[in-house]
Amino acid sequence: MTAGSGDEAFLAAGGPARHIPVLRDEVMAALAPREGGLYLDATFGAGGYSRSLLSIPKLRVLALDRDPIAIAGGALLVNEAGGRLCLVKERFGRLDQVARERGLSDFDGVVLDIGVSSMQIDDAGRGFSFRGDGPLDMRMDCVGASAAELVNTAGETTLANIFYYFGEERASRRIARAIVMDRAKTPFTSTAALAALIARVAPSRPSEVHPATRVFQALRIAVNDELGELVHALVAAEAILKQGGRLAVVTFHSLEDRIVKQFFAEHSGRGRTPSRRLPHEPVPPEPTFHVNGKQPVTPSPSEIDANPRARSAKLRHGVRTKAPPRGIDARLAVLATLPQDHSGGH
């Protein structure tokens, strides 16, 4: 499957969407939750990981989601948890601030499941998918600029860059040019209208995913600053984990996985050769994570059969060392931003 068109490609193209936590058993094994521990579920969604964590006696969970619908849907689990679950509407990039505001620190584990949820895809009114016509929205937290505002106001080069870098769309310039021409007559307000334009100017072969799949993914990432949030969340998780605490991250396409892979490589010292440092070259910082075992962890064939959403999922995880947190890494941040010197695709 084309990189960057995994979970979203399948769901947007019309595959079944189920509220099943992907790689649940593998995530729980990576977190190794302990009785009485403190954990943070940074992407609550339908509450699958939180529910699994709460099955451990006396364990407490701080859970976040930027989607108000997910927060409302989690009220029952909050009640069932009897004070062991605190559910907060917030972006996961601010997980450290949320923890501090509640007087919480020294977490035993943090889990992130990156990307769009099946609940969001299923609701045509949210505008994430073109399976059913709906408003061109795509905002996870229902505030700020929508996808329609971006499509109707951004310059041609900006749109092309978004499609090329966030969606890996090879026809990015052609699609961006057509959008700018057509929106001058009639602004884009619906998912169906945008999908129809893309299918017209960049049709795909019958065996391929819908031609609008990569553009919709790119717009969603841009509207919600998903890659930037991911970078901040990784750094924030590093800051709140205690020594021996565990970080588990599930991704669904190559853009996310590249950031997580580089984060763990840089922060674990993988591939480092200290003996080859040049004279007067600064000593690299101590590793903040140990990364053990073969990674990434991918779903079993039986899980993919039971839940097709899982087929492109990758789990990477690490164990926190005693080294102080490093903060934002400039090289990591670059992976979350659009280059300024590329006109976008072909």
Image (cartoon, rainbow, N blue to C red):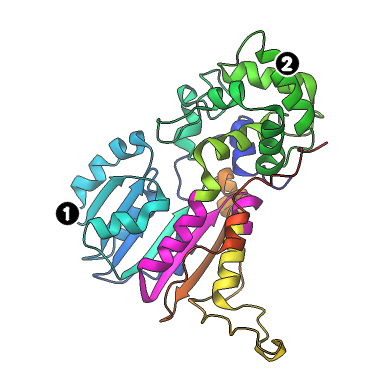
**Compared to 120, does 85 lie above or below?**
below
Which residue in the protein does label 1 denote? Answer: 83
Q: Is residue 174 left or right of residue 35?
A: right
The residue lying at 43 percent from left, 80 percent from top is 323
At mark 2, the secondary structure is: helix
Which residue in the protein does label 2 denote? Answer: 181
Could one spot residue 300 in this view of the protein? Answer: no
Type of residue at label 2? Answer: Met
Provide residue 111's location: percent of width, then percent of height. Answer: 42, 59
Type of residue at label 1? Answer: Gly
Provide residue 128's location: percent of width, then percent of height. Answer: 53, 30
Magenta range: 229-258
- Where on the picture, by quarter, is residue 190? top right
Q: Is residue 207 left or right of residue 66?
A: right
Q: Earlier in the sequence, mark 2 or mark 1?
A: 1
13 or 149, which lies in front?
149
